[in-house]
Amino acid sequence: MTNLKLHVPTDDNLITVYKCGLVAGQSVALRKQLVVHDHRGEPTGRIHTEGEVWGVLPGLESDPVLWLREPDGSRHTWEDDASVH
């Protein structure tokens, strides 16, 4: 048995203004270097540099995490809380 859920975006369930104050369509810059880790917590060797600009994407109320677009176009999630600041 799996705990996977299908999250389908509709006009009624989109998050465009996040709890942390970010708004879909905005750009944000990393305040410090971000080291990427794999699912085991091990560094992958990939590092995002301070000042790198990421875009804020719309999210879904059924999966309330902050969605960001990295400079290479990849999507990334983050907790929608004070850790963003």
Image: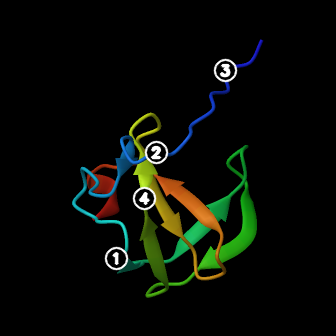
Residue shown at the point (50%, 77%) measured from the top left: 33
Q: Amino acid at mark 3?
A: Asn
Cα–Cα span, label 4 and label 2: 11 Å
Which is more N-terminal, label 1 or label 3?
3
Q: Nearer the viewer, residue 30 or 33?
A: 30
Could you tell me residue 16's position as x and y percent? 32, 57
Which is more N-terminal, label 3 or label 4?
3
Residue denoted by label 4: 58
The secondary structure type at the circle numbered 2 is loop
Callout 2 environment at 10 Å: few (<14), some (14 to 19), or many (20+)?
A: few
Which is more N-terminal, label 1 or label 2?
2
Cα–Cα span, label 1 and label 4: 10 Å
Cα–Cα span, label 3 and label 2: 22 Å
The secondary structure type at the circle numbered 4 is loop
Callout 3 environment at 10 Å: few (<14), some (14 to 19), or many (20+)?
A: few
Is 41 on the left or on the right of 23, as rendered? right
The secondary structure type at the circle numbered 3 is loop
Residue denoted by label 1: 26
Q: Which mark is residue 10?
A: 2
Cα–Cα span, label 3 and label 1: 32 Å
Q: Nearer the viewer, residue 83 or 19?
A: 19
Residue denoted by label 3: 3
Could you tell me residue 32's position as x and y percent? 42, 77
